[in-house]
Image (cartoon, rainbow, N blue to C red):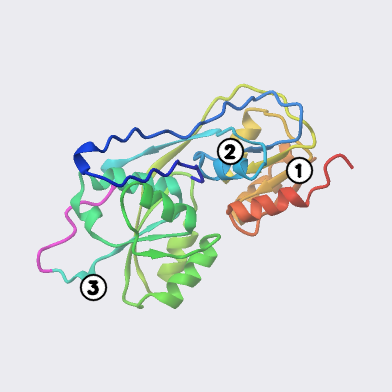
């Protein structure tokens, strides 16, 4: 998550070694802000932690709640006679999907055995943080890029398991099926809007909307809007552009949901001009 930890070195007998680890300091962040800030709807603090370490005042205001639906995940689909080369590949398209998969795998051994494929760096790191090494990483910015990666990198006889959010579309699954891949999809986690209390925001701040459902929930809660809204992905941009609540804000689509692209946009702004 971009946190810094102290490194301790010791030279001596193991029996005499006494280690007291330190925890990263999480500075409290005020919601009522008097200076331009980056407000995000991200449900994970990995990106915001790294942005703050770059000097970008970042506040997470998630407006959706994600809940795993463990009972919906396939079970008992592997037999002792199956070759590993014929096993399906689990496709994970978000850090929360990775967290759900890790949770499900604790009681679903087949999920833990098959190879995992992640959309991009953030999802790959979420697997690693859960103690699981994903076999593939598409390094993709969106579903379109992931489809291209799979088409160019994996055998045409590959099978894919795709857990989806309750609010996601079927573009990825349909595109893979149209290419001849065998795809099994299901709703693996539920995405629900939450009630959020309003807060103050400088007009020069930037709002980062991370998903179409977050755009819908932000509008339903009538939360404040700055002059600039950043969108993570084409589907989120479509949701923003078709929601009247955002019509007075300038909407920009990020090149990719990465710390670098967010930081580059922030640094390109001329504050105080």
Mark 3 or mark 1: which comes first in sequence? Answer: 3
Residue 198: where, in percent of width, then height? 65, 23
Would you say 25 lies left or right of 244 here?
left
Give the camera-side residue of 91 and 204: 204
In the rendered image, the vertical position of residue 180 relative to residue 241, given as above or below = below
Q: Which mark is residue 169?
A: none
Q: CA distance from mark 3 to mark 1?
A: 48 Å
- The residue positioned 62% from the left and 55% from the top of the image is 260
Q: Which mark is residue 85?
A: 3
Q: Position of residue 209 (x, y in %)?
A: 62, 43
Residue range of the region highlighted in magenta in the rendering = 73-81
Alpha-carbon span between mark 1 and mark 2 = 14 Å
Label disc, if present, on residue 228 of the rendered structure = 1
Task: Indicate whether residue 78 is drawn in magenta.
Answer: yes
Query: Quadrant of the image for the C terminus?
Result: top right
* Secondary structure of residue under mark 2: loop
**What residue appears at the point 54 percent right and 60 percent down from the top-left corner?**
142
Specify which label sits upstream in the sequence, 1 or 2. Answer: 2
Q: Residues within 10 Å of mark 2 (few under 14, many from 20)?
A: many
C-alpha distance separating marks 3 and 2: 39 Å
Could you tell me what secondary structure mostly forms the magenta stretch?
A: loop
């Amino acid at each position: 998550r971009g946190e810094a930890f102290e490194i301790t070195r010791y030279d001596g007998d193991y029996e005499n070694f006494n280690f007291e680890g330190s925890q990263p300091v999480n500075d409290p962040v005020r919601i009522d802000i008097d200076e331009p800030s980056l407000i995000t709807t991200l449900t994970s603090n990995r990106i915001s932690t790294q942005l703050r370490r770059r000097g970008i005042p970042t506040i997470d205001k998630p407006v959706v709640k994600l809940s795993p639906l463990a009972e919906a995940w396939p079970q008992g689909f592997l037999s002792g006679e199956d070759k590993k080369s014929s096993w399906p590949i689990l496709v994970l398209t978000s850090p929360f999907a990775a967290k759900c998969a890790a949770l499900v795998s604790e009681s679903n051994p087949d999920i833990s055995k098959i190879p995992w494929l992640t959309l991009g760096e953030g999802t790959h790191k979420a697997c690693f943080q859960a103690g699981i090494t994903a076999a593939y990483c598409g390094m993709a910015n969106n579903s379109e890029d992931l489809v291209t990666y799979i088409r160019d990198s994996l055998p045409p006889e590959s099978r894919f398991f795709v857990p989806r959010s309750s609010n996601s579309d079927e573009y990825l699954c349909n595109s893979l099926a149209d290419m001849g891949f065998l795809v099994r999809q299901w709703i693996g986690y539920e995405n629900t809007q939450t009630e959020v209390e309003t807060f103050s925001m400088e007009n020069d701040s930037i709002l980062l909307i991370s998903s179409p459902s977050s755009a819908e929930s932000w509008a339903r809660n009538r939360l404040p809007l700055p002059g600039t809204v950043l969108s993570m992905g084409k589907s989120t941009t479509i949701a923003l552009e078709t929601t009247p609540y955002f019509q007075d804000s300038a909407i920009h689509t990020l090149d990719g949901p990465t710390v670098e692209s967010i930081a580059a946009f922030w640094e390109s702004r001329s504050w105080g001009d």
